[in-house]
Image: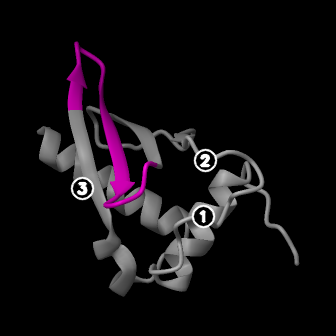
Amino acid sequence: MTGEEAAEIALEFLMTDWAIPSEDWEWFTVLNSRYIKNSWFVVEIGIEGLPDKWVLQVYEHGECDPNYTFNSPIKSGAETTGLEEYPQSVADTIAKERNGGIVSVN
């Protein structure tokens, strides 16, 4: 498996996990894909212009670990900061992740 293949697997896994419509996949980009000695690939996915990112592990046999990590410097209470220009599915996903996976009801 190559880093590009691992990145493709991770991106597809994340888009499917979040039920992102295929027309909105273009907003997501692979920031990095690196091989960890004799084990797996670590793939970082983000959205251009935002500081948030997901970190996923893809094993050599092509399976993506479902326990990925989300990192964001955005403080709690500012879940929607900077999301105005993004499609609703993308903005909702980021806001939910920034809020610790909790959907807020206004």
Query: What's the residue at 43%, 49% (across, down)?
Result: 51
Q: Which residues are magenta?
A: 34-51
Q: Earlier in the sequence, mark 2 or mark 3?
A: 3
Q: First in sequence, mark 1 or 3: give its number.
A: 3
**Which residue occupies 34% across, 42% down?**
44
Q: Amino acid at mark 2?
A: Ile
> Circle 3 — which element?
helix
- Closest to the observer: 102 or 41? 102
Label 1 sits on what residue type? Thr
Question: Which residue position holds label 1?
Answer: 81
Q: Is residue 100 above or below residue 104?
A: above
Pointer 1: residues within 10 angstroms few (<14), some, or many (20+)? some
Which residue lies under the disc numbered 3? 8
User: Could you tell me if the residues under marks 2 and 3 are in contact, i.e. CB atoms within 8 Å?
Assistant: no
Q: Which mark is residue 74?
A: 2
Query: Distance between the Cα atoms at labels 1 and 2?
Result: 8 Å
Is residue 19 something one can see in this rendering? no
Observer-nearest residue: 105 or 50?
50
Distance of label 1 from label 3 (alpha carbons): 28 Å
Q: Amino acid at mark 3?
A: Glu
The kind of secondary structure element at disc 2 is loop
Quarter of the picture containing the C terminus is bottom right
